[in-house]
Structure formats: C-alpha cells, structure tokens
Image: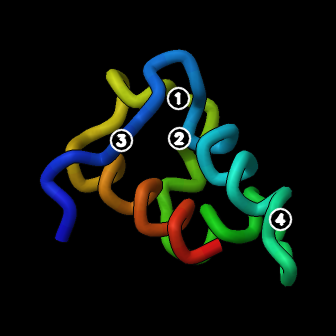
Amino acid sequence: MFQSYDSIPRLTAREHVHSVTETSTDPVFSVEALDLIGPADRMDHFPARLTGSDQQRVAVTARKA
C-alpha cells in the first residue's frame, strides 16, 4: 500500500476522485466511488481532516477510477 498519498491539500476527497474520474474512458461518479470504498461521510473534507486510512482509500479510489 502507498505510504505517500499524493494529496493536494486544497482539494477535498470528492475533488481528488473527481479529478481522475473526469478523464477516465469509463467514468464513475466520484460520489458513487466514495460510497463504495469510503469515506462517503467525509467526501467534502480536506486531506488534513481525514484519517490516514481514509486518505489511503481516497488515493486508491482516485487511482482505480
């Protein structure tokens, strides 16, 4: 698993996932992706407000989308 999550501090979890899903050839809505893997209840939080495991889930979701 990643030790560095490559988060951009000024982007929320939703924005991180959306930045990748909008360029995908088979896009998934960022809200749906975060609902599946989490943290759906914190999708509007910035990386500094997420736990390490939530940051990791956002990173994985953004890379898989």
Mark 4 or 3: in front is 3
Q: Please tell me how crowded label 1 is: few (under 14), some (14-19), or many (20+) other residues with Cα within 10 Å.
A: some
Compared with residue 52, is residue 34 higher up or lower down, i.e. above or below? Answer: below
The answer to which of marks 3 and 2 sits earlier in the sequence is 3
Work out which quarter of the rendered image holds the N terminus and state it: bottom left
Figure quadrant of residue 2: bottom left
Mark 3 or 2: in front is 3
Q: Secondary structure at mark 1?
A: loop
The three-letter code of the residue at mark 4 reads Phe
The residue beneath circle 3 is 6
Tell me, yes or no, whether the two marked residues, 3 and 2, touch with CB atoms within 8 Å: no
The residue beneath circle 2 is 42
Q: Please tell me how crowded label 2 is: few (under 14), some (14-19), or many (20+) other residues with Cα within 10 Å.
A: some
The answer to which of marks 2 and 4 sits earlier in the sequence is 4
| Picture residue at 13% right of the left edge, 53% below the top | 3
Tell me, yes or no, whether the two marked residues, 4 and 1, touch with CB atoms within 8 Å: no
In the picture, the disc for residue 29 is 4
Give the Cα distance between marks 2 and 4.
16 Å
Tell me, yes or no, whether the two marked residues, 4 and 3, touch with CB atoms within 8 Å: no
Q: Please tell me how crowded label 3 is: few (under 14), some (14-19), or many (20+) other residues with Cα within 10 Å.
A: few
| Picture residue at 44% right of the left edge, 20% below the top | 9
| Picture residue at 59% right of the left edge, 31% below the top | 12
Residue 26: x, y in percent? 85, 83
The three-letter code of the residue at mark 1 reads His
Give the Cα distance between marks 1 and 2.
5 Å
Q: Secondary structure at mark 2?
A: helix
The three-letter code of the residue at mark 3 reads Asp
Compared with residue 36, is residue 18 higher up or lower down, i.e. above or below? Answer: above
